[in-house]
Image (cartoon, rainbow, N blue to C red):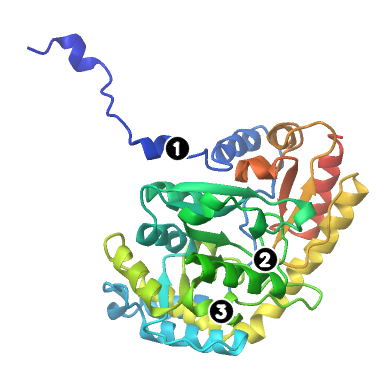
């Protein structure tokens, strides 16, 4: 017989071991701290998340409005999604990268690239398998690996390697067990870019060892000073081993819309679609119509948006250097990767920046142990705010 004390005691159900292996998600407690600071009258400058304050393309907004008024757009999208979106993506990939893709066999619409990257691990990774991933890096790389029951093998991105994963330094046992190699160039958070010679090496490495190359190309359109980031699918032989992920979030200021796609060979695309059929029923057709409109206006709209990021980059780098920080000038992305000065660790420095100066930055260690010693600034606010934030950070030195 159950007594009253037992009934009122907290009921604890055991969590899966893979859940306990998750690292803390970056900046999870920042919204609440920001709220408390704002209540005290602090003008918080948030440069933490890569979530720009800029507007999406007007064509995308109007397409969403029009679609919301059509009852057929509110039906289940399923994994097929909006055929016109698939065809527009294929057309854009051909114009932008010279890559020819079958819109129905080699492309898959996603609810943002994040979920596709995480879910792809379910297709290829199991117990005893490992994945090779950049450290620091985007959380879905490690999250998808752990949820699939695999073992992540993080590789520190260091300046002496130009923030590239040194393939020849990987342990033989890791290479033997590896099912996926995650790469992301232009890189978040380091803003590094990969030369084509390195991409050729990576494709050859993955072909030799039968490893799936997951290439996160979310920042492909944010290049500066004439730099044009490539697609991995431009590299000879990549179609057999690579799946590339694209997102409208950063390029088109559509982070909350959650629309992206995967591109690659028909086999991994079909596998990902099958996994997703058990997880989601596709992105709202109206958002896919908006994505179609955004891509159709890309050549006219994107250059001005990139110019805004470049102006912010120039202002932020100048201000950070003037405040005493070692900040490199990135050729791509919407981030600046700067060294933490003195003996401060990155988490402690970021905590002081928030609590003492009202500035949100991303501590490098929050994105993996390999990021220790650095912090990331997102170019998500106007130039004057970036200069003010740099001055406040300088006051901590």
Q: Which residue is mark 3?
A: 233
Residue 169 or 195: which is nearer the viewer?
169
Q: Residue furthest left?
A: 1
Task: Check the picture and name the quadrant holding the N terminus.
Answer: top left
Residue occupying the point 59% across, 39% down = 30
State the separation of the CA atoms marked 2 and 1. Answer: 28 Å
- How crowded pointer 2 is (Cα within 10 Å; few <14, some 14-19, many 20+) is rated as many
Residue occupying the point 72% across, 37% down = 346
State the separation of the CA atoms marked 1 and 3. Answer: 33 Å
- Side (left or right) of 343 relative to 240: right
Percent across and percent down for residue 332 are 73, 67
State the separation of the CA atoms marked 2 and 3. Answer: 15 Å
Above/below status of 301 relative to 259 = below
Above/below status of 157 relative to 342 = below
Disc 2 on helix, strand or loop?
loop
Disc 3 on helix, strand or loop?
helix
Q: Which residue is mark 1?
A: 21
Percent across and percent down for residue 304 are 72, 77
Q: Which residue is mark 2?
A: 186
Task: Check the picture and name the quadrant holding the C terminus.
Answer: top right
Q: Is residue 363 visible?
A: no
Residue 247 or 396: which is nearer the viewer?
247
């Amino acid at each position: 017989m159950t007594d009253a004390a037992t009934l009122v005691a907290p009921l604890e159900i055991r969590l899966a071991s893979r859940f306990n292996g998750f690292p803390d998600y970056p900046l999870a407690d920042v919204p609440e701290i920001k709220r408390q600071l704002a209540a005290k009258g602090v003008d918080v400058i948030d440069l933490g998340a890569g979530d720009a304050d800029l507007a999406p393309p007007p064509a995308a907004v109007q397409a969403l409005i029009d679609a919301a008024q059509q009852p057929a757009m509110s039906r289940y999208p399923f994994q097929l999604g909006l055929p016109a979106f698939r065809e527009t993506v294929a057309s854009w990939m051909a114009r932008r990268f010279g890559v020819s893709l079958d819109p129905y066999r080699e492309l898959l619409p996603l609810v943002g690239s994040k979920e596709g990257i995480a879910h792809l691990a379910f297709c290829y990774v199991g117990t005893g398998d490992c994945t090779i991933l950049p450290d620091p890096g985007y959380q879905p790389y490690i999250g998808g690996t752990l949820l699939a029951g695999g073992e992540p093998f993080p590789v520190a991105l260091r300046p002496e390697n130009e923030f590239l994963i040194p393939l020849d330094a990987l342990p033989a046992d890791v290479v033997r067990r590896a099912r996926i190699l995650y790469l992301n160039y232009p890189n978040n958070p380091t803003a590094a870019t990969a030369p084509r010679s390195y991409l050729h090496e990576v494709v050859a490495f993955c072909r030799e060892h039968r490893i799936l190359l997951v290439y996160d190309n979310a920042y492909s359109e944010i290049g500066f000073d004439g730099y044009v980031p490539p697609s991995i699918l431009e590299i000879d032989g990549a179609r057999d081993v690579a799946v590339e992920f694209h997102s409208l979030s950063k390029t088109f200021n559509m982070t909350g819309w959650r629309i992206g796609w995967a591109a690659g060979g028909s086999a991994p695309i079909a596998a990902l679609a099958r996994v997703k059929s058990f997880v989601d029923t596709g992105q709202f057709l109206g958002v896919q119509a908006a994505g179609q409109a955004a891509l159709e206006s890309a050549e006219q709209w994107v250059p001005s948006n990139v110019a805004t990021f470049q102006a912010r980059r120039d202002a932020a780098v100048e201000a950070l250097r003037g405040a005493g920080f070692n900040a490199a000038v990135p050729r791509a992305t919407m981030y600046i990767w700067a060294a933490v000065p003195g003996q401060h660790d990155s988490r402690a420095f970021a905590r002081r920046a928030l609590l003492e100066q009202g500035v949100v930055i991303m501590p490098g260690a929050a994105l993996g142990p390999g990021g220790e010693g650095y912090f990331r600034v997102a170019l998500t606010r106007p130039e004057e705010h970036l200069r003010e934030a740099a001055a406040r950070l300088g006051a901590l030195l």
